[in-house]
Image (cartoon, rainbow, N blue to C red):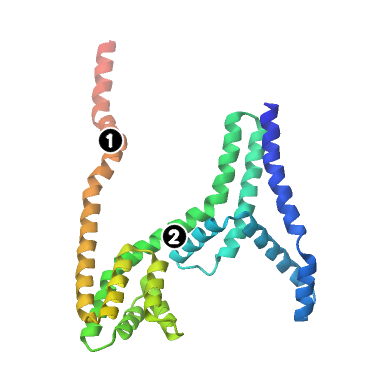
Amino acid sequence: MQVIAYAGILAIVAPVTLLTFLVFTGDRAGIRKIQANLGMQVTAKSGSIDVKERLTQVGERLTPKGYAGWLDKQLAGAGRPKEWPLARIIMIKPMLALAGAGLGLVFFLSSPSAPNFLILVAVTALCYFVPDILIRSNAQKRREAIRMELPNALDQMLISVQAGLGFEMAMGRAGSNGSGPLADELIRTLQDIQVGRSRKDAYLALADRVDVPDVRSFVRAVVQADAYGVAIANVLKAQAQDMRIKRKQRAEEHAMKMPVKMLFPLIFFILPTLFVVVLGPTVLSIVEMFSR
């Protein structure tokens, strides 16, 4: 038991010591040179900013590059909320892990045992990955909203193209008339084109940011139509019809899954209550009759 207790204390003390060392020991000489070259003077206000930057640097050191890239991709799928940039998430994750480790250590020291040590590790890991869970959940909801909005947006672009507008103007009309995440992504794609990015790169960047198979299929069709000179109206018509069929099939699939999803609540919650209400008085009467 003492070995497990010592291991739990070491598991908390070592990360805290490392984090404190990395925060308060950095390249101070390099920072002073940069501030001298820029003509900056360190003030009390900049001290808090410096601590924040140090925490961000510590988080970047503790986070693998591949994992940071995965987080950045999930943030892109979630629409890159302004309140939660990648640097802030990387800074907060170790702090949450230390907070969870502290709570788990208090619980572990109250009654040291192997199961409680596993609980300590589980709480620490859960607190560390809480931002990932929230970001991934928001990204999934946003992708589902884009998937639902895509057929209507394609219909609007098709009507605009058939009315004589160009594809980019039709995309802008669909983006300005819409109000969901797909409209924001269409407007951002047009902004990328306006600042000098090629249309192909802007469309492919749209598919990478959204990461929805339907959008990727639509972008691929548009890029091929632009490369081979196919009429964009025909492509939009075929894509809009295909997306409507897929949306109908998904609705039918969800409707067919509902009886299976309702089966378990029906068996474990509704039917026992119904049996108690219907058969309860009869059973009590039978028990009373035989007890005489």
Residue lying furthest bottom: 164
Taking the spot 77% from the left edge, 75% from the top edge, the residue there is: 35
Q: As displayed, is residue 237 above or below residue 287? A: below
Residue 94, given in percent of the width and then of the height, sits at 63, 53
Residue type marked 2: Asn
Whether residue 40 is visible, yes or no, is no
Residue 156, given in percent of the width and then of the height, sits at 26, 78
Whether residue 234 is visible, yes or no, is yes
Which quadrant is the C terminus positioned in?
top left
Residue lying furthest front: 228
Q: Give the Cα distance between marks 2 and 1.
A: 32 Å
Choose mark 2 or mark 1, whichever is in front. Answer: 2
Residue type marked 1: Ile
Residue 6, given in percent of the width and then of the height, sits at 71, 33
Q: Quadrant of residue 276?
A: top left
Please tell me the numbered disc located at residue 125.
none
Taking the spot 75% from the left edge, 61% from the top edge, the residue there is: 26
Count residues near mark 1 (Cα–Cα under 10 Å), then give few for <14, some for 14-19, many for 20+: few
Please state if 193 lies on the left or on the right of 222 as rendered.
Answer: right
| Residue named by callout 1 | 267
- Of 240 and 202, which appears nearest the observer? 202
Residue 223, given in percent of the width and then of the height, sits at 31, 75
Taking the spot 70% from the left edge, 39% from the top edge, the residue there is: 10
| Residue named by callout 2 | 138
Taking the spot 26% from the left edge, 70% from the top edge, the residue there is: 151
Please state if 186 lies on the left or on the right of 103 as rendered.
Answer: left
Count residues near mark 2 (Cα–Cα under 10 Å), then give few for <14, some for 14-19, many for 20+: some
Q: As displayed, is residue 211 above or below residue 117? A: below
Provide the secondary structure element on which disc 2 rests.
helix
Residue lying furthest top: 292
